[in-house]
Image: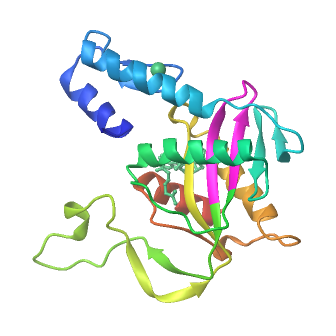
């Protein structure tokens, strides 16, 4: 099964006049029946996944003009836990992660838009130590860098573990709603609520195995 990113790349290469679906964000060619079928399937699954129905005693941790952030904890109603899992599946599908089992207990933060759609998600887990990602891999003269061989996973880590409290296992924002500060607000709220009674510093959180987008975001966020 193709990931969404893969579909975007294929659509861009094969067809002129590709359209972006305004609801699910998929890029596809309306002129191609295969694309249309793939889109119809993805569209339905995606919209079902991001549909949000509130429940009694939901933990609203922040409210904004364009939405709110809801925290899902391990002892929340089954519906809420199922929803968090469904969103994680969508995110994993987009990131190309395969059935990764999460260490428990995780906390899921959902950014719910005023249209009652889940447009952002942050999954946090307690982590004790982490290795700092170094911005530039050390150059090895005369041989290709890891960068060109494995662009997705080439980030270089320090060898010295550092003490942290929280690991961001996933962070995701709906493709058509990026660069509006949604991920930043999710991390802000997580830092404020993850540990009761303390505000986590940016050097007390870690991003696990970041993608290129994730790394750019993390570098910028942690500089602020
Ligand atoms: N390229 C360059 N800079 C970026 C990018 C990017 N793609 N994304 C964020 N930034 C920087 C910018 O400086 C931005 O500020 P600006 O828009 O004023 O310039 C700043 O970070 C804050 O960005 P936000 O608007 O808060 O981030 P956004 O809501 O767009 O979400 C995210 C960022 C989550 C990485 C999004 O691009 C995404 O979902 N990508 C696909 C999924 C993914 O790769 N997630 C990370 C996986 S790694 C992990 O989960 C541990
Ligand atoms: Zn669509």
Q: Which colour scheme is used?
A: rainbow
Q: Give the range drawn in magenta.
A: 108-123
**Residue 114 spot, x, y in % from top left:** 76, 27
Q: Which of 66 and 32 is in front in this view?
A: 32
Is residue 36 highlighted in magenta?
A: no
Q: In this view, does 23 lie to the left or right of 63?
A: left
Q: Can residue 144 be seen in this view?
A: yes
Q: Main secondary structure of the magenta part?
A: strand
Q: In this view, does 184 lie to the left or right of 170?
A: right
**Residue 180 spot, x, y in % from top left:** 63, 38
Please tell me which residue is depicted at 30% across the width and 38% down the height of the picture: 2
Look at the image and tell me in which quarter the C terminus lies: bottom right
Residue 110 vs 167, above or below: the answer is above
Look at the image and tell me in which quarter the N terminus lies: top left
**Residue 170 spot, x, y in % from top left:** 55, 56
Please tell me which residue is depicted at 80% across the width and 34% down the height of the picture: 54
Residue 48 vs 219, above or below: the answer is above
Residue 18 vs 119, above or below: the answer is above
Numbered marks: total: 0
The outermost residue toward the front is 78
Q: Which of 115 and 187 is in front in this view?
A: 115
The outermost residue toward the left is 142
Please tell me which residue is depicted at 36% across the width and 72% down the height of the picture: 136
Q: Can residue 181 be seen in this view?
A: no
**Residue 181 spot, x, y in % from top left:** 65, 44
Q: In this view, does 220 lie to the left or right of 70?
A: left
Is residue 118 highlighted in magenta?
A: yes
């Amino acid at each position: 099964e193709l990931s969404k990113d893969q579909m975007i790349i294929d659509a861009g290469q094969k067809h002129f006049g590709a359209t972006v679906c305004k609801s699910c964000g998929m890029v596809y060619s309306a002129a191609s029946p295969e694309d249309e079928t793939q889109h119809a399937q993805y569209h339905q699954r995606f919209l079902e996944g991001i549909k949000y129905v509130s429940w009694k005693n939901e933990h609203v941790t922040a409210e904004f003009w364009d939405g709110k952030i809801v925290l899902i904890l391990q002892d929340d109603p089954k519906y809420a836990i199922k929803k968090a899992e469904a969103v994680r599946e969508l995110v994993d599908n987009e990131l190309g992660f395969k059935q990764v089992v999460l260490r428990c207990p995780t906390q899921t933060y959902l950014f719910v838009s005023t249209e009652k759609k889940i447009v952002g998600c942050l999954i946090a887990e307690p982590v004790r130590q982490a290795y700092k990602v170094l911005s530039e891999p050390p150059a090895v003269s005369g041989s290709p860098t890891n960068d060109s061989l494995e662009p997705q996973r080439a980030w270089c880590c320090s060898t010295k573990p550092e003490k942290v409290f929280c690991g961001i296992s996933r962070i995701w924002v709906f493709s058509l709603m990026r660069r509006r500060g949604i991920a930043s607000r999710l991390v802000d709220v997580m830092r404020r609520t993850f540990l009761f009674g303390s505000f986590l510093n940016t050097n007390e959180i870690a991003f696990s195995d970041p993608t290129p987008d994730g790394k750019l975001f993390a570098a910028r966020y942690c500089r602020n």
